[in-house]
Image (cartoon, rainbow, N blue to C red):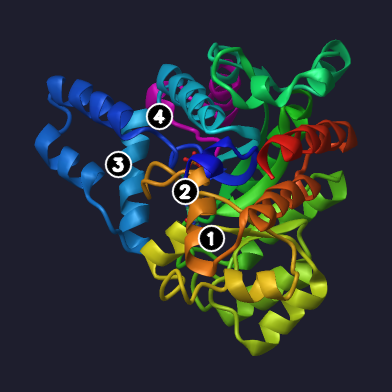
Amino acid sequence: REWCVALPKVELHAHLNGSVRDSTLLELAKQLSDKGLIVFEDVKGVIMKNGRSLQECFRLFELYHILTTDHDTVARITKEVVEDFAAENVVYLEIRTTPKNNEAKGMTKRSYMNAVIKGLKTVEAVEVMLFDSNLRTDKTLTSTPMSELGGDTRKKKIYVRLLLSIDRRETTLAALDTVNLAMELKDQGVIGIDLSGNPVVGEWETYLPALEHAKELGIPITIHCGEVANRKEIQAVLDFCPQRLGHVCCLNDDEWKKLKSSMIPVEICLTSNVMTGGAPSLELHHFADLYNAKHPVSLCTDDSGLFSTSLSNEYYLVASTFGLGKAELFQLAQDAVEFVFAGDEVKKSLREVFKRAEKELK
Ligand code: 5GP
């Protein structure tokens, strides 16, 4: 397990509100309960409960959003989430989050994102590399020894990029707003679009115009695919050919073949899929099939808070379940560099990070 923590890692599928520390959620719940807005004991039970069905997760997100959706709290949770990933040697992190309009809180999608970006800028525990311009000013990264990136005595560095999520509950217009916002914020760390939200809600045709708009604008896209067996939508998603796919749980034989010939990288979320029933067990998870077929895959947490996991733990689970050794785990972590949405300069720096780490870890 310690080795998995020391391993530099790339996280490509982490939802902001699903990655919040339990302690922060409990603190926020206590504050709302003191104001008489919720009953703390009820909420505590829900937050601390283990094992959740997919539909329970989406009900839980309703609660999380009540607790976290004001500007200051959004900034706070963003800061903490980055610090938590950096603490376990994640060297590149794509955080995805749904920009939210909330009139009661004076919040627009834009002001929500401003709060997220503010949160990134207040991180102190690690150095956040948010802009490509960091690369020009930062001459030290490629010469920084691994012990600084991976050790805990000096300030670590982490690349952070943002993906804006379209929630399946949204209208076409709201989804288009999110894509336009991503374009507006492309110099502020936003580099992609995600489609997520409750998979039994909404229709593909509703988001398609926004996804096509993103494609025309050249914004990379990742899509939650096959969390439920919606044949029509799985086909449509595979035909759309996004840059990456999340989950790919409920594919039939034909879809499986189509996925494999597409070579679209898949964000694998082991714990999440097993907990929500997308995979029958760790042992029977489709990771093994994709890995053996040499399909591009990357291990991810999905919702480290909600599912009480960490990226290091996901690597450990792969080792303990499928018998991968250190060299194979290292390769798996390193391969993920090629699937990041950030540009070539960032990839180049990340390849250096892995090259240096190889000597210490293999
Ligand atoms: P947020 O976007 O509010 O920062 O993060 C929480 C949101 O991410 C949820 O409301 C939901 O829309 C999305 N999300 C988190 N985990 C999952 C998941 O496992 N599957 C899907 N489809 N959406 C998810």
Closer to the chain start, of discs 4 and 3, is 3
Q: Give the range drawn in magenta.
A: 98-118
Find residue 313 and name its label: 2
Disc on the earlier residue, 1 or 4: 4
Numbered tag placed on residue 63 in the rendering: 3
User: First in sequence: mark 3 or mark 2?
Assistant: 3
Front position among marks 3 and 2 = 2
> Amino acid under label 1?
Val
- The tag on residue 69 is 4
* For residue 292, side relative to residue 116 (left or right): right
At which x and y percent is residue 133?
84, 18
Q: Mark 1 points at which residue?
A: 318
- On screen, 31 above or below 177? above
Q: Nearer the viewer, mark 3 or mark 1?
A: 1
Q: Is mark 4 on a helix, strand or loop?
A: loop
Front tag of 2 and 4: 2
Badge 1 element = helix
Label 2 sits on what residue type? Asn
SS state under label 3? helix
